[in-house]
Image (spheres, grey):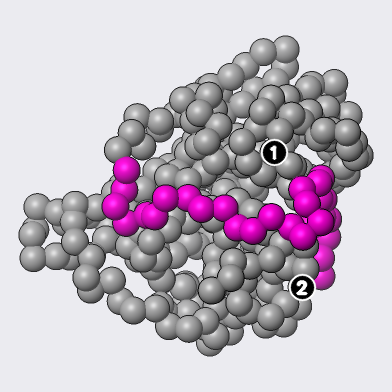
Amino acid sequence: MAYDASDPRAALAPAAAPAAAAGPFTAAHYAKFYETPPQEEADGLRTWYVRGRNFIVAYSEVPAGATLTCSGQPDEYVLLLPDHGIAAEVTAGAETKTIDGYSVTFIPPGDSRITITAPGRIVRLFTPRSEDLAAQCSNAADFIEPDPRIPPLQDWPTPPDGFRIRSYTLDVPKEPGRFGKIWRCTTFMVNYLEPAAGPRDLTKLSPHHHDDFEQCSLVLNGAYTHHIRWPWTTNSTHWQDDEHEYCKAPSVTVIPPPSLHTSRAEEAGQMVDIFCPPRVDFSMKPGWVLNDADYPMPKG
């Protein structure tokens, strides 16, 4: 890890360098929704689908009155309303809640319905257990074979008071020593990073790697360059060129282990980091997970 001293992640326990990494390596994925047609389009609703090993991102432009349903949903999923102007009504089982914009909501397994009451854009996060959605992803063919570096997905413990619709405003003041604004559920961790006021200082980047999980970086506003480097091994046929991918909004980048990576804001913007399942190291930091009282950590 190489964090600037001002970065809250500098206080994380140092990770071992990926010296034991062996190729061949998995490629990064870049989904630039502004360059490609949606996978689903009907009645003013447009949805792009892209996936990683354990997650699916569904980015939608939605008109008022649009309804999105899940029948027999196998696990908890996420609804992100990134803008203040949009609003929705969410029903799960016998429970119904009005959800304002600029919020993140965790929706229980089973049958559920999202009705858009004010138009805008939404992001939903699912696991590939939703096989119908996994099949629609633009990069579905790249995830047919398992990745030995990434363990099979295991859900985190169910909340003590059971599943229900849980919604949280994104309007949380910045706090010294806390990294972004983090919420978790049984399947996902969502880190709504502090917005970039402008281009990131070139002398204060944060190259780091993950041994056994992907990072999903969702760009909602502005533009970012994702810098990714793979380890060199004794087998040079497994070497990969460095990547410096410029991604505007809206876009998703899937960063695989054990690549070394960092992202630079090129202008004012907003990025969200997504992990599935939740990260233990972030969860261990006091005060970092804003809803940790609602979702317990695994034991042991």
Regarding residue 88, the answer to whether it shows in the image is no
Q: In the image, is residue 103 above or below residue 117?
A: below
Residue 98, x across and y down, in percent: 91, 39
Q: Quadrant of residue 94?
A: top right
Q: In the image, is residue 29 above or below residue 91?
A: below
**Which residue is found at the position 14% from the left and 65% from the top?**
233
Q: Quadrant of residue 239?
A: bottom left
Q: CA distance from mark 2 to mark 1?
A: 32 Å
**How would you rate the neighbour count of disc 2 (Cα within 10 Å): few for under 14, some for 14-19, many for 20 or more?**
few
Write down the region rendered in magenta: 146-173
Regarding residue 141, the answer to whether it shows in the image is yes
Residue 266, x across and y down, in percent: 53, 58
Q: What label does residue 174 carry, if any?
A: 2
Query: Is 128 positioned to the left or the right of 97 in the image?
Result: left
Q: What type is the residue that disc 2 sits on?
A: Lys
Residue 62, x across and y down, in percent: 74, 26
> Which comes before the other along the chain, label 2 or label 1?
1
Q: What kind of element bears circle 1?
A: loop
Q: In the image, is residue 216 above or below residue 131?
A: below
Q: What kind of element bears circle 2?
A: loop
Q: Nearer the viewer, residue 194 or 76?
A: 76
Query: Is 221 positioned to the left or the right of 210 in the image?
Result: right
**Which residue is found at the position 73% from the left and 68% from the top?**
292
Residue at image mark 1 = 109
Give the prevailing secondary structure in the magenta stretch.
loop
Q: Nearer the viewer, residue 282 or 206?
A: 282
Q: Nearer the viewer, residue 114 or 111?
A: 111
Residue 39, x across and y down, in percent: 53, 22
**Which residue is found at the position 43% from the left and 55% from the top?**
214
Query: Is 38 positioned to the left or the right of 269 in the image?
Result: left
